[in-house]
Amino acid sequence: MDREPTYREVQRFRQRWLWAPLSGIALLMLVLGPVSWIGLIIVGVIALFLYSLRLETEVRADGLYLRLWPLHRSFRRISWTEINRYESRQYDPLREFGGWGIRWVPGKIAYNVSGNQGVWIERANAQSVLVGTQHVGEFVKAIDEVYEN
């Protein structure tokens, strides 16, 4: 099998609404003193963890590959034989899944980092999967090209 991806997307948590509160908390801890070094270290560790998170999505000849690094050390594969159908769709991350990241709700799972566009994948004998993307047209086009061959 060809292991080289025909499509690859890497998304990171870089939203202002996420970083502003963390920066504000750290700034308040420094300005209002006395400095709580333990609190500052905790905020720093949380910031480093969020900064390191990245959703990697690949379309390959043998399936769709997903990884939210560093939570997943290796890719999670959805083979083409598992997929009943797929479609691009708009979604509400907070209402439908309770937020961003890897989110489980009964019967479905979401891998999303930002935005409200994604590809909905209905699988034969497993949970449906929503994969968030910033390039929905390119992502679906890549799936179309590989899935139909």
Image (cartoon, helix red, strand yellow):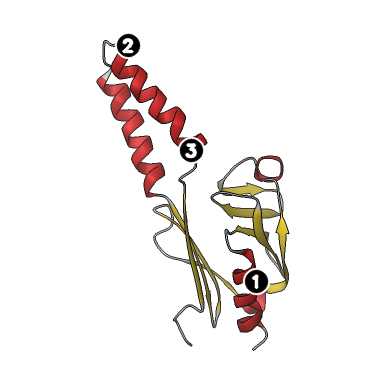
Q: Report whether 1 appears left or right of 131.
A: left
Residue at 65 percent across and 50 percent down: it is: 116
The crowd level at tag 3 (other Cα within 10 Å; few <14, some 14-19, many 20+) is few
User: Does residue 46 show up?
Assistant: yes
Contact, CB < 8 Å: mark 1 with mark 2? no
SS under mark 3: helix
Residue marked by disc 2: 32
Tell me the residue at 66%/79% (across/down): 144
| Contact, mark 1 vs mark 3 (Cβ under 8 Å) | no
Quarter placement of the C terminus: bottom right
Q: Which residue is mark 3?
A: 16
Instruction: Residue at 49%, 42% (x, y): give it.
Output: 15
Among the 4 quarters of the image, the one containing residue 122? bottom right
Residue 65: give x, y in percent of width and height: 52, 69
Rendering coords of residue 26 (x, y %): 35, 24
Left or right placement of residue 72 versus residue 96 in this view: left
Question: Measured from the top left, where is residue 138 in percent x and y?
Answer: 60, 71
Which of the two discs, 1 and 2, labels the residue nearer the N terminus? 2
Q: Indicate the quadrant where residue 128 lies.
A: bottom right
Q: At x 60% / y 41%, what residue is drawn?
A: 99
Determine whether 96 is above or below 2 in the image: above
Q: Which residue is mark 1?
A: 140
Q: Local crowd at mark 1 within 10 Å, few (<14), some, or many (≥20)?
A: some
Looking at marks 1 and 3 on the same chain, the residue that comes earlier in the sequence is marked by: 3
